[in-house]
Structures are given as structure tokens and as C-alpha cells.
Image: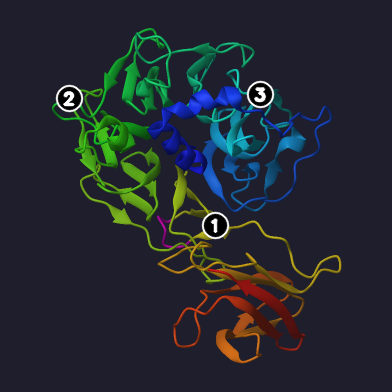
Amino acid sequence: MKNLFSIVLFLYMVYPGVIALQAQTRILNSFRVDAQPAEPVLRLTSSTVTDLAAASSGLWLGTGRGLSRTADNGLSFQSFSREQGIGQGGVSALAVSDEIIWVATGFDSSTALGPQQTGGGLAYSTDSGQSWEWVPQPGEIPILNITFDIALRGEEVWITSFAGGLRKSTDLGVTWQIIPPDTLIFDPPTNRNHRAFSVINADGTLWVGTAGGINRSVDGGETWTNFNHQNQPEPISGNFVIAIAQQKYQDREIIWSAGRTTTIESGDSTEFQSVFYTEDQGFSWKTTLEGETIWNIASNQDLVYVASDNGLWISNDFGATWLLFPAIENATGTQRVLSDNVFSVAPLSDGRLWVGSGDGVASTVNRGQTWEVFQAFSPAGVEGESRTYAYPNPFSPNVHNRLGGDGHVRFQYNTITATTATLKIYDFAMEHVVTVSEGVARPANGDFYETWNGRDADGRDVANGVYFYRLDLDGDGSFWGKLIVLK
């Protein structure tokens, strides 16, 4: 997936001179892969889920803290990071095929110019994640050279990045060949079509999204056809193409893409962001969901799913109409995805649908009527730790866990007996601010949380400052904590 690093890349697209500064930049963060990989961590380690891919080995999740997998629909997770042999940082791209998994990572480097996004290289496994081989980031300098997408085509591995462009390896990453999606010499500082975002293999046909449109090759990258907003009567909406997907249903094949504008650089004010699709191999395009900021597209039979900044969209009529899923929460209301942003979506052949967000991953078997929600957290009340804690702390209602116009903070706690939970907030003078929850039934031996939107009992935003909260568990006791609110 591209989304973790899209802002950096957009600035890079608008100001291509940044690439010239790489020669003046020295990476101060060192990186090596341990010779003796540790065992995977047996839990989900991050609630930021940017990529999803299903294989016979299970569902793989690209997260802000590495790679995770569940082979039992969320009953258990394994998580892989630098200690297990993949690259440093969060996952920026993911591709799976049977037992073969490829993953790319990225992280911040301290440089003479300040923090810069840096490619952490790639890693692959040919045994369903039991062991990993790490591959250095292709290109002379990894600064602003992050792999954004991976596609597998037979023995070929195709990757996209901004500074590194479109590359292909046929020897498991030992060597890489730069493949510009045109006939020109590779020149990403001045050629927008050489700054690559997305790539898929659609039954042997390669589709590549760049900052200069979408490109198709039917001969393995030997020749290309470019489609952009300026060169067709029925064009794509915007030349900054960050997502591509193939839909096959009965006798129809549709290529779906998501575009953003390059208006600042191209000077063409008619570009706009949307989803666009073609049924004639790119020679004409239709647009839909105009104005939406899209991260990912996926399909299953006649259904198309679009992950966006406003949530998850679904269409059962090939884009003629769309339905926005409501907020995601589990059947009991004890777990809720506190994020408007949906980053990734994976419909499985068995009918289960997985959704990744900035606040966890969720699955449904009935098209969103009920959900199971999985989020990363540190259990409260274990190994001498407090029975309750607040996170994030400090809490910014304008930044954290934004859903429906509000930010949210969680108060995590555990129960050891069947009880009811009441949570109240007090200001620094110990005056009551709001009752967050009252008399909520909780079973024994569980991990739970309450959420607060940073508003008082009258619905007004609270001021910056220190606040205290009291958690009352009936028959168990009262537990206090402190929270700092910073807008």
C-alpha cells in the first residue's frame, strides 16, 4: 500500500528537485537484519492496518509496525518485524501467492535535512513466513525511495517507487532492472511517468500507475501504452494513479483505478480525483465517486469495494451506484473502529470481508451486518501493571481516532469478576466534567475499554489541561488515572 507515505510523495511529485538533495543527505540511522531471527510475536502489534492480502497460508496484514498474519480468522495472530527478518519500519507494500510472500517496509531517517522517509528494503518468504530473506532497497540511495506496490508475474517480481521508478527482478531480488513504462531514458526528476505508485498483474497484462497516468503492457514490459487525462477523449480523471485492481465476473473484465490530480505540476485544472474504470483495455474510461480520496480497491465476483478517507464503499452494479458502510463495531458494542479512514479491503472467496483502518482490522461474513474487530493494545493489570490506563496520552481531540468529526481517547481496563463499569472524568480542580459510561455490564476475565470524545456533559470541547478519571468496577474497586488533553 501507498498511503502511509503519500503526503511525502505528493510533495516530492510537486517539487521534483528534492531528488537532487539526496546527494547531500547522509542516513544517520543504521540498519541490519539479525542473523538469528526471533520467533514471531503472538499478537497483533499495530492497529494501523494499511494492506491486506489473502493466501493459502492465511490473511496477511501490512501494519505500521511490520507484518502480521492470522490463519484462523482472527482467533490468533503472528507478527513479524525486523527481529524476524523483514525490513525496518512499517509495511509499505505487500504481495502474496500461495506460500510466497513479498513485503516492503519504510521508516524515518535522521538526516542533515531533518527526518526523511526511507526505504527499508524488501523481504520474501517461500515457506509461508517460517523464514525470511531480506533484500536491500533497490537504488543507490534509499532516502525518498520507498517501495509502494509489488506485483508477482510468474518468476518476475515487479515493484514501484518514486525515486526508484518501476523495477523488475527475476532472481528473487539479487538484481533489479529499471523498466520505464515508455521508450524514454529513466528520468524521474522531470518525467512524471517514471515516478511509480501502483502495479498489478492482470492475467499476464501489466498495469502500472504513475504520476503521469496509467500504463499497460501485454508483453511483459517490452512495450507500453500510456493513458492519461490529456491524451484521450474519455480519459482518466487524474494522472496521479495510486491504486489499480482487476475485476472478473462472468464474461466481463474491468480494470479499476483511483486517481488524484497533478494540477500544480501539470497546470491542467480539469483534473480531479475519483475512481475510474475501463472495460476496453484502457481506450476509454468512466469515472465514479468523484472527489473521494481513495486508498485501495478490491472485488469479488460482481461486488466492488473501495477504501477511502470517508470509509468503505460497495457497489453491486459495476459502479453505477455506491453504498457507504456504516461505522464498524462488534455486535456487543464493546469494540469500535474509531476512524473514518479505511486503508485496505480484502474480500475472500468464502464470503468473508476484511477491512483495515487506522484503528484496527475488522471482518464480516454478512456484508457488514455484524463485525468482529481486532485491535492492538497492551493488557491492563498484568505483571504488576495498573488495572487501567488511557491512550493516546496526551490526547488531542483534533488528531487522534477521528470518527464523525470527533476525536476519541480510550480507557483500557481488565475485569477479574463479572461486574458493571462506570467511568467519570474530572478536571484538575476535581470538579466533575462528564460521565463517560455508567453501569455497563462486563463479564469476568476480560479486556475492555471505554471511549471519550473530549467533550463535557453539555457537549462542549474541554480546555487543554490535566484531567483525572475514575473507573468503578462494581464488587472490585475504584481505579484512578490521569489524562492530558492537548489540542
Residue 367 within the segment the image draws in magenta: yes
The residue pinned by badge 2 equals: 232
Q: Residue furthest left?
A: 233
Q: Is residue 247 visible?
A: no
Label 2, label 3: how many angstroms apart (C-alpha)?
Answer: 42 Å
Q: Earlier in the sequence, mark 2 or mark 3?
A: 3
Tag in front: 2 or 3:
2
Q: Is residue 467 above or below residue 406?
A: below
The residue pinned by badge 1 equals: 359
* Residue range (magenta): 366-370
Residue at 60% across / 11% down in the picture? 175
Task: Give the numbered dot on residue 126.
Answer: 3
**Residue 195 place in picture, x, y as percent:** 42, 25
Q: Amino acid at mark 2?
A: Gln
**Residue 301 place in picture, x, y as percent:** 35, 38
Q: Compare residues 60 and 81 and report the one nearer the observer.
A: 81
